[in-house]
Amino acid sequence: MALPVTDLRARLASLPGLETLLPVLGELAWPSYLVGGAVRDLLRGERSIDLDIAVEGDAPAAAHALAARLGGTALGHERFGTATIRVGSLTADLATTRREVYDRPGALPRVEPAPLHEDLGRRDFTVNAMAVALTGEGLGTLHDPHGGRTDLDAGWIRVLHQASFVDDPTRLLRALRYEARLGFALHPDTERLAREAAAGGALLTLSGDRIRVELEALLAEPDAPGAVARLTQLGLDRALHPALAADPQLVASAQLGALQTGASPVLSALAALCIGASSDGQRQDLERWVAGLGLPAPAREAVLSATRRAPALADQLASPLRPSELHESLTGEPAETLALALALGAPAEPILHYLAALRPARLEITGADLVAAGIPESPLLGRALRETLRLKLDGELCGREEELRTALSLAREAR
């Protein structure tokens, strides 16, 4: 049942920061609307942190006018008809209402100004295709041309048209993210279209960067394992890459391991998706796919290292290791490798002992102490210090004097 305008006005006024913008928006020449997820959350009685405002007119000009009147700043992107305004702790994104034209499946759309109803018609799902008027006598009026409120009440995620997933296949991953976040389900017709798009190779039309953005957002959801389970059910994992293993339990365990090791939950989950290769050739192909996602180099190497090393590490840690052996095995491994090893069944105690006690362990002496004692500078110094640290980790040395005596003895013997 639709809320009365008075109720929507009251909810608008309760949104943090919007009470500051409303009076000034009403003074501008262009009709403005709250759109997207903010409207969805407003109707669900939730507080939204995102203020997305559609302007039937010049959004960058509106943003600069707001900033000037409120003593804030505005950053406009004239080419895209968008702008961001900041006033104290308030941030709001403004965009000119527009239509989109897709030259080919998976391509970024060409956009041009259009009325509000066309702007709403270009959006991904009906629950995100609603607007609430922020200006004029219709302040608080809900614009819902695609039945978003009905689907919101029913708990459906529904696309607006038959070609939605073909035009923009990122919506396939986004649909599962909204399912997980909202506790909703794909409408049967939408699920059919999703399966058809996945089987038809729609995801192959996307760039690696666009896939990465959506995958990271999906894996950052509190119920990421639930979304991963749906990846498998709809065949989207194999549509992304034939060797992806969308195991929701492994993803959940990897994210738990990330909390224990200080790893990135998102990167740990991504690594968990990427260990399903059954042959060297498939593994190399999957690594090329990861490299093509456009991750920053440290993140890419963390994921690849985890997929390569975690299975063997989990097997190795199943047997007792001396502290020095544990230190040697784990030193230099990204935290994501340790998180995935835990997910694969590695015992937690040695990994947590390494992180808490062995990784920060240091000698009280340095190479300068050995040089001062008459040992020439050479690679022998490093080897003597490493062996001394090994003995210290295993509890065979205690204190600076024993460290120095042992290191000197080792260096002299090596000479």
Image (spheres, rainbow, N blue to C red):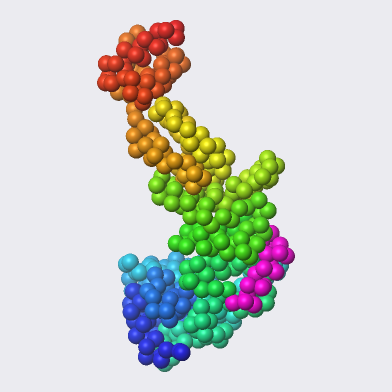
Is 198 a magenta residue?
Answer: yes
Which is nearer the eye, 368 or 334?
334
| 282 is higher (above) or lower (below) than 357 | below
Which is nearer the eye, 116 or 6?
6
- Provide residue 25's location: percent of width, then percent of height: 40, 81
Q: At 44% from the left edge and 18% from the top edge, which residue is drawn?
A: 383
Horizontally, residue 237 falls left or right of residue 43, namely: right
Q: Is residue 60 visible?
A: no
Q: Main secondary structure of the magenta part?
A: helix
Is 43 a magenta residue?
Answer: no
- Provide residue 217's location: percent of width, then percent of height: 51, 60
Horizontally, residue 158 falls left or right of residue 205, namely: left
The residue lying furthest to the right in this view is 200
* The magenta segment: 187-205
Quadrant where the C terminus sits is: top left
Q: At 36% from the left edge and 82% from the top edge, which residue is drawn?
A: 11
Horizontally, residue 285 falls left or right of residue 5, namely: right
| 301 is higher (above) or lower (below) than 371 | below
- Provide residue 29's location: percent of width, then percent of height: 45, 84
Q: At 67% from the left edge and 77% from the top edge, which residue is drawn?
A: 162
Q: Is residue 189 visible?
A: yes
Q: At 28% from the left edge and 21% from the top edge, which residue is drawn?
A: 398
The part of the image, by quadrant, that contains residue 214 is: bottom right
- Provide residue 322's location: percent of width, then percent of height: 41, 27
| 52 is higher (above) or lower (below) than 145 | above
Which is nearer the eye, 380 or 265?
265
